[in-house]
Image (cartoon, rainbow, N blue to C red):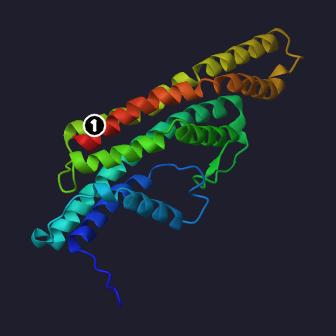
Amino acid sequence: MGTELTLDVGTLYSFLLVLARISGAFIFVPIPGIQAGPQIARAVIAVSMTLALEPRWPAIDPSGMNILLLTGWLLAEGGMGLAVGLLVAFLFDTFQMGAQIISLQAGYSFASTVDPTSGADSSVLISISQTSAGLIFFATGMDRQILRAFADSLSSQPPGHFSITLPMVYRMIQAGSSIFSTGLRLVLPLLALLLMVELSLALLTRLNAQLHLMQLSFPIKMLLSLMLLGWLLLIFPQVFERSAARTMQLITGLLSS
């Protein structure tokens, strides 16, 4: 006896709206190695997470739905996902900003390679910071916290009830400004050490011009940067956890407001 698979229109609408909310986040979330793989990987992960949230899908009445209303809801849900993805990307960019500052001062920016994550030229320190931030992202369980926040948002703020407000935009701008402040504070000890090296070499060269110590400044700064960076890597998880806690508060407030 044959069986017939039927799909309710309201269920299809729910799937599309939840998929739009989830997919918007995956545009900006810098998952380690996802850019180096096929582009279909993001789509598969987004659909898998949407199906995993099936018990939380909202009930949509198809009788009152039209193409204009559905398009507006899809755009709103995509905007919510984009906002969450941006907040997570700001967290990763904090470490990249610190690595960029050190790469310029220590001389690592003169030698760059292709970054498989972004596809652009970047120094070795930026690649290290991206890899470290990605590993800490999964080690601290932030991926599960974001998925739980999405699941809770389907109950507290179902599709069709999200709207962008000025306080929300203001909090997003504040989160973006933390990239520069936190990144600078993270590498400030290394910047102070490099400044002391520059002043010491300049003073010695001024006292005796025959030494030509400025030619040795690059090897010295690069070696000292690696030594101090190895110590700074020990505090990366603590800085990441504090920044992630503030980011999760913003994400929770955004998805539940």
Quarter residue 102 falls in: top right
- 26 lies left or right of 119: left
Q: Where does residue 169 sit, x and y in percent of width and height?
A: 27, 40
Picture quarter with the N terminus: bottom left
Q: Where does residue 60 sit, x and y in percent of width and height?
A: 18, 64
The residue sitting at 39% across, 52% down in the picture is: 25
Quarter residue 165 falls in: top left
Picture quarter with the C terminus: top left
- 141 lies left or right of 200: left
Q: Where does residue 182 sit, x and y in percent of width and height?
A: 48, 27
Q: Is residue 89 visible in this depiction of the protein?
A: no
- 162 lies left or right of 36: left
- 247 lies left or right of 67: right
Image position of 1 with respect to 168: above or below: below
The residue sitting at 10% across, 69% down in the picture is: 64
Kind of residue at disc 1: Gly
The residue sitting at 65% across, 43% down in the picture is: 127
Camera-nearest residue between 189 and 251:
251
Where is mark 1, residue-wise?
Answer: 253
Image position of 72 with respect to 147: above or below: below
Camera-nearest residue between 58 and 185:
58
